[in-house]
Amino acid sequence: MVNLIWLGLIAIGTIVAAVNGRIEVVTEAALEGAELGVKVALGLISVMTFWLGMMQLAEEAGIIKMIARIVAPITRFLFPSVPKDHPAMGAIVMNLSANIFGLGNAATPLGLVAMQELHKLNPDPKHASDAMCTFLALNTSCITLVPATIIAIRMNAGSANPTEIVGTTIFATLCATVVAITVDRILRKIYRFRGK
Amino acid sequence: MLTTIINEISKWMIPIIIFFVPLIAYLRRVRVYESFVKGAKKGFSTGIKIIPYLVAMLVAINIFRASGAMELIISLLNPVMNLIGAPAEVLPMALMRPLSGSGSLGLATELINTHGPDSLIGRLASTMQGSTDTTFFILTLYFGSVGIYRYRYALYTGLIADAAGILASIFIVNLVFG
């Protein structure tokens, strides 16, 4: 699936650019994309190093297990395949709370820690596990309570009430999360039934 | 009021973690400095590991964005937007949202500045930007960090949730501000 989408983006993009008579933008865009990819990855190294250090401390101190145990009633429903006080649960909870409170800098490294923990439980290292799919469903749909960047942009544009969109944003993001959890459940059953 | 409380929590959360995690660890007889360094060692390799995945995906997305293929899809989808009560101006942003975070933020900024932050379009763009995260980026990054190529159904879930977020934004903004 990802192979087809990847090819589609490149092939359609190149053909449309050629038809539009702007074939030269393809080269430029490709190199720009490569540069951006490396920049983002390198930029993550500092925060990754810091948060991986903190997470190691938290794990050795038993804090991650404690968090995992506190949220067990919810996570048992969402992640039935993960043992209830596995460190993955603690990392998932920390990633989601960092997202909710808009700590983008911390959210990504914590999410990557969660993925590494989930990967330890993954029987097939090339395929996404059920728990990973659920985690990413939550992660891509559930986002910050206070969208600070948008509020700042609205403020700069001279809004009479820059924060008035907080309520509508929370509603929209909640809808997306509920849909994500539901669709994840349904697809999980279908894929398991088909043995994929 | 609620916004202020949430902002305060956001401001305090990381300092609290930075203060309490090493302290609790020390009290539980963890060799804190050694333990931190042991964990931190994996930071560099993780960062390097995701480079090929991110480059692959961002190159494809960038070519698609720069080519004008987006405009083609937009002209096809415009009638649908009118049908569900959304101004056609927000369509490019809605389509960009799952592909590129900075791209959709750029489009949102443009809409807010052109139509005014307190216009229906401005409010809709603001709400849409915050309603979901950048699905393609998250999947590439997270799966890449553990070397997974087969996403199974994760992308479908992400994209359906994105669509739900966009539709919910249109519905609620029309209801509250319309």
Image (tube, coloured by chain):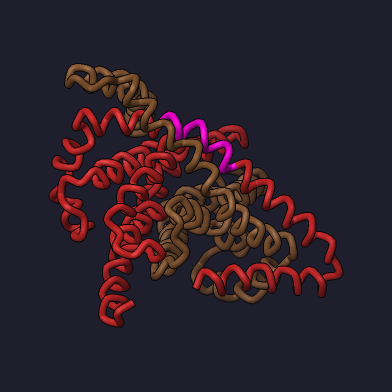
Chain colours: A red, B brown
Give residue B155's position: percent from left, percent from top. 44, 66
Q: In this view, does A45 lie above or below A192?
A: above
Residue farthest bottom in this picture: A194
Part of the protein shown in magenta = A40-50
Which of these two is toward me, A100 or A122?
A122
At a point 57% along the width and 36% down the height, the residue shown is A43
Image-based side of A57 in relation to B175, left or right: left
Q: Main secondary structure of the magenta part?
A: helix
Q: Does the magenta stretch include residue A42?
A: yes
At a point 30% along the width and 82% down the height, the residue shown is A194
Q: In this view, does A40 lie above or below B5?
A: below
Image-based side of B157 in relation to B138, left or right: left
Q: Does the magenta stretch include residue A6?
A: no
At a point 64% along the width and 76% down the height, the residue shown is B76
Give residue A112's position: percent from left, percent from top. 40, 45
Image-based side of A79 in relation to A135, left or right: left
Give residue B2's position: percent from left, percent from top. 32, 33
